[in-house]
Image (cartoon, grey):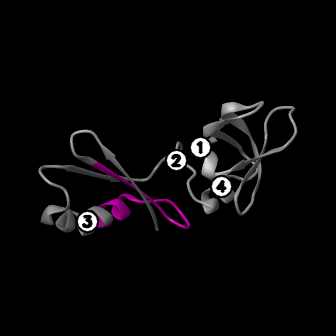
């Protein structure tokens, strides 16, 4: 099971869990919450807090190379740390491949380009419903 964590305003701790296979169930969220609550209450977080455990949903971030590999063949949005000449800081295109140091994306009618992981601030799969 993969876990992603975000700390929100007003002591909100959000945990997003994913399964290697299959869907995240309500029972999965309950188990993770019950396992973490006693540890968090022992003082890891000072003061009151809210714990939220869920699956990341359709707008899940692509963080790990394995996340990008699952999205190959689909469309992705990349927010870049630094602008790339001819593309800017926001890129949307078809994810063609995942390499050791980055991803290969075809943006519109432009030639295929490689975007390095170190320059990707945030990445998401683009969902299309017909």
- The mark found on residue 60 in the picture is 2
Q: CA distance from mark 4 to mark 1?
A: 9 Å
Q: Quadrant of the C terminus?
A: top right
Whether tag 3 and tag 1 are in contact, CB under 8 A, the answer is: no
Q: Mark number for residue 68?
A: 4
- Quadrant in which residue 43 is drawn: bottom left
Front position in the image: 90 or 61: 90
The answer to whether residue 75 shows anywhere in this view is: yes
Residue carrying label 3: 36
Out of 42 and 113, give the one closest to the viewer.
Answer: 113
> Whole-Å distance between the Cαs marked 3 and 4?
28 Å
Look at the numbered disc 1 and give the secondary structure of its residue.
strand
| Stretch in magenta | 13-31
Left or right position of 11 against 66: left
Tell me which residue sits at (26%, 69%) in the image: 35
Disc 1: which residue: 124
Image coordinates of residue 62 in percent, x first then y, are 58, 51
For marks 2 and 4, give the CA distance: 11 Å
- Determine whether label 1 and label 2 are within 8 Å by CB: yes
CA separation in Å, label 1 and label 2: 6 Å
């Amino acid at each position: 099971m993969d876990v992603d964590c975000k700390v929100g305003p007003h002591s909100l701790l959000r945990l997003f869990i994913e399964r290697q296979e299959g869907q995240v169930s309500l029972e999965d969220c309950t188990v993770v919450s019950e396992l973490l609550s006693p540890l968090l209450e022992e003082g890891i977080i000072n003061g009151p807090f809210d714990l939220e455990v869920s699956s990341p949903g359709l707008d899940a971030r692509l963080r790990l190379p394995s996340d990008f590999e699952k999205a190959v063949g689909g469309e992705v949005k990349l927010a870049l740390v630094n602008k790339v000449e001819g593309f800017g800081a926001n890129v949307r295109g078809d994810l063609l491949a995942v390499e050791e140091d980055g991803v290969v994306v075809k943006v519109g009618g432009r030639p295929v380009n490689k975007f390095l992981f170190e320059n990707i601030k945030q990445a998401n799969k683009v969902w299309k419903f017909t």
